[in-house]
Amino acid sequence: MSIEQQFEEALVESKQLTEKPSTADLLKIYSLFKQAKEGDVQGERPGGFDFKAIAKYDAWASLKGKEKEEAMKDYIALIESLKK
């Protein structure tokens, strides 16, 4: 199975987790997904009091330079660890 197929399978599994992941894990899931799908973060960092958007932006920005395939592998590993 290719890394893309494993990634797509992990996407489905992420929606079927029995327990809701912690906020930190949710940010990791989001940032790895965005890095795998879109590459490095683009656009301006949100301002004001939209703390959720700022946290998501910062989490994604922290992965700048990570290769798409590496982000997919990390995403798959994270989802696997959350299934246990």
Image (cartoon, grey):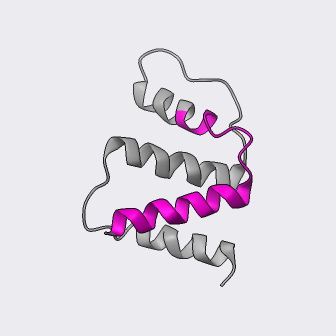
Q: To which quarter of the image does residue 40 belong?
A: top right
Quick check: 17 left or right of 68? left
Q: Classify residue 22 as left or right of residue 36.
A: left
Quadrant in the rendering for residue 63: top right
- Residue 23, given in percent of the width and then of the height, sits at 34, 42
Outermost residue, left direction? 19
| 83 displayed left or right of 61 | left
Q: Is residue 30 above or below residue 42?
A: below
Q: Is residue 4 magenta?
A: no
On the image, the x and y values in percent for residue 17 come to: 32, 67
Q: Residue furthest top?
A: 48
What are the residue bounds of the magenta stretch?
59-83
Q: Does the magenta portion include 82?
A: yes
In the image, 49 versus 32, the foreground residue is 32
Dominant SS in magenta? helix
Q: Give the residue at x 47% y 30%.
A: 55
Give the total number of marks visible in the rendering.
Answer: 0
21 up-or-down from 63: above or below:
below
Residue 1 drawn at (x, y percent): 65, 85
Residue at horizontal 45 percent and vertical 43 percent from the top: 27
Q: Nearer the viewer, residue 67 or 51?
A: 67
User: What is the quadrant of the C terminus in the image?
Assistant: bottom left
For the point 31% across and 47% down, which residue is it? 22
Report the residue that reaches farthest toward the bottom: 1
* Of residues 1 and 8, the one drawn nearer to the viewer in this rendering: 1
Q: In the image, what residue occupies the spot 32% across and 53% down?
A: 21
